[in-house]
Image: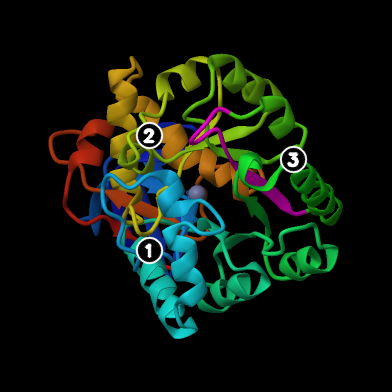
């Protein structure tokens, strides 16, 4: 039996107490003093879901000052040329290394916007079976057979922006994904503001970025129940400050993603720290980070099921060490390794 002691996130609030784990299963969640010496002490959270990744491009050398178009825009941004030309063995090793590091940083699962059509999805599925894979078609025009091939492997489709592929193509894809019951998500208003009506007409499960969106656009997402994934470090790399304060005041449901492996380590604690520090400068309390860091990402893939921790559940847990007292600020700034139950 192993005890995790400290402040425990149960549902959407904390208790001061402990969790007992045996053979990878939670056997007790209690308030009060830990009955024996704990294996780890700190803030105990369900393992965060990294809500937006591109796990295969870690070997691309991204130099600060490069623009979004030059680096990541399809079809000929630097990373797309790399992904087309790199040998499969190199991509597989890169993906495996990414998953291993994410797990060591305490991340549970990650939602990857996988490039390379059905083949790209298959490579990730074989390398990381529990990845949440949102594939993207490669053909320049709608091809139902290609889409069905992707959806037979992936969990859904993760599109570039409507500016990149056009609304007609995006609508055809969205119809097919919904008919097949897959997840649909897309990049939105990252480099330029895009038409929020055209985006919401696709009925996406969530959108990513919205750095150039207006408060009105964000409010429309909130009203439609469409969550927004914020990738603070990636946005800052390109010189954009995500308007997290505005998004939260508009009532958007935010989650957090680490975006391209070439830009950021898949470290949700570091990503959440950048998010919380940016939010704090925009008038948002540091403690507001737990919803975006932990709860909302899990809702995307666990279908809004309960976030309660109970005896009998798998120990899908991470403990953030927390020198100086239990606060989000101390937990996210503590540089010591997390204690995580690995996949
Ligand atoms: Zn992305």
* First in sequence: mark 3 vs mark 2: 2
The answer to whether residue 47 of the structure is visible from this angle is no
Look at the picture and state if 281 lies above or below 161: above
- Disc 1 to disc 2, how far (Cα)? 25 Å
Give the image location of residue 51, x and y in percent: 50, 48
Find out whether residue 185 is within the magenta segment. yes
Q: Which mark is residue 167?
A: 3
Q: Which residue shows up at 17% across the image and 44% down it?
A: 334
Question: Left or right: where does residue 291 sit relative to residue 220?
Answer: left
Q: Which mark is residue 284?
A: none
**Tag 1 secondary structure:** helix
Look at the picture and state if 175 lies above or below 11: below
Mark in front: 1 vs 3? 3
Give the image location of residue 245, x and y in percent: 41, 19
Q: Quadrant of the N terminus?
A: bottom left
Q: Nearer the viewer, residue 28 or 296?
A: 296
For disc 1, the marked residue is: 103
Mark in front: 3 vs 2? 3
Question: Left or right: where does residue 108 sit relative to residue 170?
Answer: left
Q: Which residue shows up at 47% across the image and 76% down it?
A: 85
Asked if the residue at label 1 sits under 8 Å from ligand 1, the reply is: no
Q: Which residue shows up at 25% across the image and 40% down it?
A: 332
Q: Which residue shows up at 57% across the image and 79% down it?
A: 126
- Disc 3 to disc 2, how far (Cα)? 47 Å
Mark in front: 1 vs 2? 1
Magenta residues (range):
182-193
* Mark 2, other Cα within 10 Å: few <14 / some 14–19 / many ≥20: some
For disc 2, the marked residue is: 15
* First in sequence: mark 1 vs mark 2: 2
Q: Quadrant of the C terminus?
A: bottom left
Question: Left or right: where does residue 153 sit relative to residue 268?
Answer: right
* First in sequence: mark 1 vs mark 3: 1
């Amino acid at each position: 039996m192993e005890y995790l002691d400290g402040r425990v996130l149960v549902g959407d609030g904390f208790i001061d107490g402990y969790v007992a784990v045996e053979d990878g299963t939670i056997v007790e969640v209690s308030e009060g003093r830990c009955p024996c010496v704990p294996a780890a002490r700190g803030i105990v959270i369900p393992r965060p879901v990294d809500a937006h990744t591109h796990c295969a491009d870690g070997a691309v050398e991204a130099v600060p000052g490069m623009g979004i178009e030059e680096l990541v825009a399809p079809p000929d941004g630097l990373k797309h040329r790399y992904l087309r030309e790199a040998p499969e063995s190199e991509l597989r090793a890169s993906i495996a290394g990414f998953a291993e590091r994410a797990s060591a940083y305490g991340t549970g699962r990650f939602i990857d916007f996988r490039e390379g059509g059905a083949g790209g999805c298959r490579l990730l599925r074989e390398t990381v079976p529990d990845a949440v894979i949102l594939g993207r078609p490669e053909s320049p025009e709608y091809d139902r057979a290609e889409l069905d091939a992707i959806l037979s492997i992936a969990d859904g489709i993760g599109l570039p922006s409507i500016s990149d592929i056009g609304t007609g193509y995006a609508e055809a894809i969205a119809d097919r994904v919904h008919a097949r019951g897959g997840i649909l998500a897309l990049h939105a208003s990252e480099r330029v503001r895009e038409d929020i009506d055209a985006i919401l007409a696709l009925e996406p499960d969530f959108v990513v970025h919205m750095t150039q969106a207006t408060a009105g656009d964000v409010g429309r997402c909130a009203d439609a129940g469409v969550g927004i994934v914020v990738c603070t470090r990636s946005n800052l790399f390109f010189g954009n400050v995500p308007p997290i304060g505005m998004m939260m005041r508009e009532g958007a449901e935010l989650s957090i993603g680490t975006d391209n492996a070439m830009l950021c380590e898949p470290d949700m604690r570091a990503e959440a720290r950048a998010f919380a520090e940016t939010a704090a400068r925009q008038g948002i309390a540091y403690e507001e980070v737990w919803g975006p860091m932990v709860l909302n990402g899990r809702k995307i893939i666990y279908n809004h099921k309960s976030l309660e921790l109970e005896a009998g559940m798998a120990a899908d847990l991470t403990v953030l060490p927390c020198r100086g007292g239990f606060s989000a600020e101390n937990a996210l700034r503590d540089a010591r390794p997390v204690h995580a139950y690995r996949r």
